[in-house]
Image (cartoon, coloured by chain):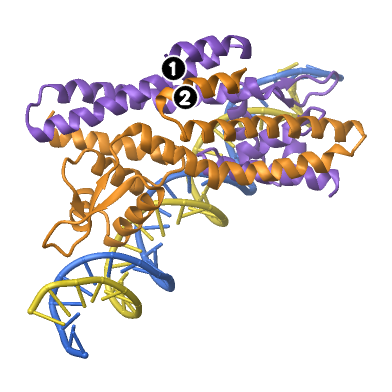
Chain colours: A orange, B purple, C yellow, D blue
Amino acid sequence: MSLEASKQKFIDTWGALGTEWGINKSVAQVQALLLVSDNPLSTDEIMESLTISRGNANMSLRQLLDYGIIYKKVIAGDRKEYFVAEKDIWKWALKIALMRKQKEIDPVLSVLTELEAETKKDKTAEGKALHQTVHEIQAFTEQLSTLVERVAGSTRGELLLKLLKLVM
Amino acid sequence: MSLEASKQKFIDTWGALGTEWGINKSVAQVQALLLVSDNPLSTDEIMESLTISRGNANMSLRQLLDYGIIYKKVIAGDRKEYFVAEKDIWKWALKIALMRKQKEIDPVLSVLTELEAETKKDKTAEGKALHQTVHEIQAFTEQLSTLVERVAGSTRGELLLKLLKLVM
DNA sequence: TTGAATTTTCAAAAAATATTGAAAATTCAA
DNA sequence: TTGAATTTTCAATATTTTTTGAAAATTCAA
């Protein structure tokens, strides 16, 4: 397999995985392309390499910049913007986890907390069953949210202690 | 808020969360409905409650049975099938995690392992950069896969030791 | 067996999501 | 300033995914 073919396989695999986990295919592919490039790439190079439109490339890049998992790189004497990926997987995986926690898990957590309080009063059998279920899922989600936060703010070295506290 | 309204809010919230994480909305809603029901429900009751078609209800139920997170419940003297949810969140969350690991993460892991070997030989700067990136993501994914497997086979009590081993 | 009740299948339709591409906005060297 | 280069926006289009619903298959009591 040629280098080019290996890169392509990585990009395709990464795009497919993203799709399964609710991340736009183009966004995942742009990250993958930058991850396997040893030099910064311009929007035009990305468009050509992935055969996607300028609009798509632009929006995907903005989203990855938002996530904080790619960076702009200025190249002297060139007006174009260039981009590089954060290559430290520990860093970018945690940023994605933290971002998805904030955007997707925390809003659910606040609904669960509201419903937990709301259903507390009810003394019917049906009401108690509902409260019990909501309570357990609320507590679980809260622990998950806490775990992500604690892990996100840690080096690998600190992680052990924090996991210990959490599990005990 | 009435009990009915609380249930509905839970079901809607759960369906929306599922969608964001690549789980079909109807599938997530059927699980949610069964989670907050204190008695078994038939396909007809589920169809009516969620206003979804028979085909959709049937396929969603089969998928949840496949995942092992809902069960069939026979009601004496009734030919219809009834369904109940696994209410222990620790059990069903781990089953979902394990299932997604097997179906989605492990195939990616095997591609990464293949690419890691494939790119090992290459001595060009570009080849070394690619190999390094693939290697790191491969190792990370493998650890993740191992983590899910170990956690899945554990009670909460055993988990501490396994986490310890993994992090050290 | 028979046939009514129930479940399953899957092609077609609908809905949701992603992508395009050209116009508008912005940037910046001369 | 000016205007060419570059980036951004977003309505229109394309693609993918989900859902429907009716026909086919299956089940089971009589």
Pointer 1 local density, CA inside 10 Å: few below 14, some 14–19, many at least 20? few
Q: Is residue B4 above or below residue D2?
A: above
Q: How many numbered marks appear?
A: 2
Is A147 placed left or right of B109 in the picture? right
Q: Amino acid at mark 1?
A: Val
Secondary element under disc 1, as helix, strand or loop, is helix
Does the rendering let one see residue B10? yes
Residue at mark 1: chain: B
- Point out the image quarter for the C terminus of chain B: top left
- Name the residue rendered at 69%, 23% in the picture: B86
Residue at mark 2: chain: A
- The percent position of residue B102, horizontal first and vertical second, equals 44, 22
- The percent position of residue B22, horizontal first and vertical second, equals 50, 39
Q: Nearer the viewer, residue B59 or B79?
A: B59
Does the rendering let one see residue B53? no
Q: Nearer the viewer, residue A96 or D21?
A: A96
Q: Nearer the viewer, residue B29 or A114?
A: A114
Give me the C-alpha separation between circle 2 and circle 1: 8 Å
Q: Amino acid at mark 2?
A: Leu
Q: Which quadrant of the figure has residue C26?
A: bottom left
Q: Which quadrant of the figure has residue B96?
A: top right
Where residue A116 is drawn, which disc sits there? none
Where residue B167 is drawn, which disc sits there? 1
Is B113 placed left or right of B58 in the picture? left
Pointer 2 local density, CA inside 10 Å: few below 14, some 14–19, many at least 20? some
Q: Is residue B146 above or below residue A45?
A: above
- The percent position of residue A96, horizontal first and vertical second, equals 43, 40
Secondary element under disc 2, as helix, strand or loop, is helix
Q: Which quadrant of the figure has residue A92?
A: top left
- Name the residue rendered at 30%, 24% in the picture: B138
The residue identified by callout 2 is A159
Is A90 placed left or right of B60 in the picture? left
